[in-house]
Amino acid sequence: MLAAIPVESLSDVRSLKHHLHQTYAVPLFRQVVLQDCEIQDDSASLLSPGDVQLVVRNTFSTTPHAEVQDFLRLVRDGRVSEVEDVLMRFHDPNLPRGLPLDCASESGHLEIVRLLLQAGARISPECLAVASGAGHTEVVGALLEARADPESRREGRFSALLCASNNGHAGVVRTLLEASAAEEGSASLDWAAKLGHLEVVHLLVQAGFGSHEVDGPLDGTRLLSAARGGQVEVASLLLDVGLIRGWGQHALSPASPALQWYADALSEASGHGHIKVVRLLLEAAATAAALDVTGLLWTRLPGTPLIETSETGHVEVVRVLLQAGASPNLTDKDGLLPGAQPPRSVAQHLAGRTALMAGAATDLLDNRGSSALMYAVDGRRKGAARLLLEAGGAMPTEQRYQEALSSVLEAETPSPSGEEDFDLFA
């Protein structure tokens, strides 16, 4: 290769090497410049016209172990000029064990990443994922330009898209999607929905993840995740874009698949006390069929929304559900009624009391043959027992329950396990 370069555009050998790299794609850190058969130092000046020769090395120099570790520290600390000086001495950019590029990528040292790539550093499977998880958008872009695999995984398990989505790095997610990253896209949407990363959810939905064609029947899992995590904005977005198949008030019949997702999401939001999500779901489709369905296939909660929130003590949610028409006289999968389990806190007591005031039956038996009052007696819950009696609960017919009830009501000691007496709320 012959090239004529105006000497006034250069100051020293280093600037010549950069010019050759940028103009002719000659590897920057493999260039050796000779003049009159002598190797020229990078700082050697080029003030007068003349001929120089260029040699491109095919091998790296042998570097002692101590210097290899020193180089890694320079990379980690982001010391750009010193890293460049070492690379100019033909140091292997992959020593030790390919760590320099991984380290620079995770730390977000963009200029060092570019220097290492120019020096021939290999891109490991972890490199793109660690940069994505750390949110370094420009580093991710540089790695993709260097032909990093957008589907590469960290430790063989976590894709770059999942790492970025899990941490809410929307800029990285956008960059990866533009590079056609698709590995673990549905799982990425799950985590983004659960953690409330609204912009990430929007990007993934726009990219087609979560659609029926991609996920088949599991098209309500994101709504369930958002409801469980109390992510009202994400839940609203998922409803707006219509990810739930058959969604709409007219479709929420007992046989509708959408009813299952709706009921499960409402139970999760209610049981965890996420009042804003509960209101959102009720505004979207408040039907009796949905309000009184027990937890179905995809939720760990066995009861209706009212039962779940009565058990966990979220009084305001109980009121909202009752106002929306939830029945206080339905049992859960185990046959238990709202407030049937002895309350463990004042909040749970108030929630159960609210359900009773709305007309919850006090004399219904569960599938074990026990009433709410029997549970209160067995647990020696004085306040709960008095509340149930005042609400019209029938006295147990068995003598042992009558004697136990009298003992509980006459007791002057606090309820077991340090529980406060609920008499002041009766």
Image (spheres, rainbow, N blue to C red):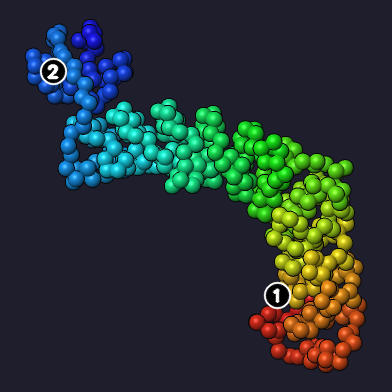
Does residue 325 appear to the left or right of 115 in the view shown?
Answer: right
Q: Which badge, 1 or 2, comes first in the chain's sequence?
A: 2
Does residue 416 appear to the left or right of 146 in the view shown?
Answer: right
Seen at 14% across and 9% down, the residue is 51
Q: In which quadrant of the rendered view does residue 16 lie? A: top left
- Residue 11 visible, this orientation: no
Q: In which quadrant of the rendered view does residue 234 lie? A: top right
Residue 236: x and y, percent?
72, 43
Residue beneath label 2, please?
34
Residue 11: x and y, percent?
20, 17
| For discs 1 and 2, the disc positioned in front in the rendered view | 2
Seen at 15% across and 13% down, the residue is 52
Seen at 62% across and 32% down, the residue is 207
Q: Nearer the viewer, residue 16 or 144?
A: 144
Residue 348: x and y, percent?
74, 70
Residue beneath label 1, please?
344
Does residue 254 appear to the left or right of 17 in the view shown?
Answer: right
Instruction: Look at label 1 and name its amino acid.
Output: Arg
- Residue 50 visible, this orientation: yes
Counting labels gives 2
